[in-house]
Amino acid sequence: MKNNLLKNGILACAFAVAISSCSSGTSSNDTVDSSSSDTAIVAEIKPIGPAPEWGKSIKPEMLAVMEKLASYGDKPIETLTPTEARKNHTPTDAVMDLVDENNIPMPTPTVDTIGKDLEVNGGKVHVRIYTPKSGNESFPVIVYYHGGGFVIANLDVYNASAQALAEQVGAVVVSVAYRLGPENKFPAAHNDAFAAYEWVVKNAASIKGDPKKIAVVGESAGGNLAVNVSIMARDKKIMIPVHQVLVYPISQSDMNTESYTKYVAAKPLNKPVMTWFIKNYLNNMAEAKDPRISIINADLKGLPATTIITAEIDPLNEDGKLLANKLSAAGVKVDSKNYDGVTHEFFGMAIIIPQAKDAQGYAAGQLKKAFK
């Protein structure tokens, strides 16, 4: 993947929706600078070719991103070592290049960012804290966990999602760079995720946060982590999140569900890649049945109200639906929304994908209601 902080800073603002913000760059200490423009513009991006066999219902804008991603000629993730895979281009890179090629203007930032290292068991975890520029009151807090199958990706790749949430909700967002496998095997990421949440609960006031208004949000593997954080908070009897937003969460280990079968060869996530993720994070394949991985088998009673967002063209589509049903059966209030014609990773692409703009607005609205 490209690790260009300048581009990822620009991309974050491009993705932010409604009255969002952007930066002309980010530095090594996670600060955000400004750029000129007043409003976010969702550009009309068109694909070059026809819809692929793996996604006949794909929306034109989504297809354009997948075409750009394929144009880099990277080797399939499942054929690479984790170190090699982390050098592959990402969907974020594809969107950034489309933004550059179409001269899309960038809006002005409304958040500042700063990085901080947290001491955790066995090492350190870096977090990036997004703070609204306006207002001196205590803001609600969102602890955000990025995707990447517990093995790849980082805070920069998912900068857009975290920044958009901070801007649209008017919240402090703490984005957590939990340690990755295979260097740090299961349950390292899960323990890191909870340690970061626990730090936020204890230190919210020091980051202009309201300790009584803390939510968790996660995408893909991060969605799995968010649920586990809520479970651990309940079991350890510390304050549970007031809400959790789960975007196409990894919820179970059966790779023969309807969506896994239908979208076995989808992009950017498919069954071979998911198998590769699990093998690189877990100590052995038997751990896939652990309720921390297969959270549909966990005790879900007493968890916070939950919002689940799923994408149609995604092997994990069924994961989200199964989890919604299990949570409801456990007495948890669940709202969910499925987006047709889009793939895994669509959530952060609001500058190009209309469905992403809607999904970000939906998530932000749900969080605002919970914080009130």
Image (tube, rainbow, N blue to C red):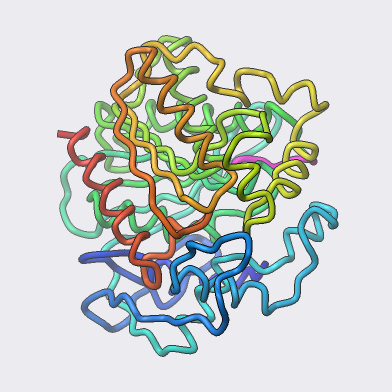
The residue at 62%/72% (across/down) is: 69
Q: Nearer the viewer, residue 88 or 4?
A: 88
258 sits left or right of 337 in the view: right
Q: Position of residue 258 (x, y in %)?
A: 58, 38
Residue 150: which quarter of the image?
A: top right
The residue at 48%/60% (across/down) is: 30
287 sits left or right of 2 in the view: right
* 175 vs 161: above or below: above
* 211 vs 150: above or below: above
Q: Position of residue 9 (x, y in %)?
A: 46, 70
In magenta stretch: residue 84: no
Note whether residue 7 is visible.
no
Q: Which residues are magenta?
A: 178-182
Q: Nearer the viewer, residue 163 or 205?
A: 163
* Quadrant into which the C terminus falls: top left
The residue at 37%/59% (across/down) is: 356
Q: Position of residue 164 (x, y in %)?
A: 34, 58
* 362 vs 8: above or below: above
Magenta: main secondary structure: loop
Q: Position of residue 128 (x, y in %)?
A: 47, 51
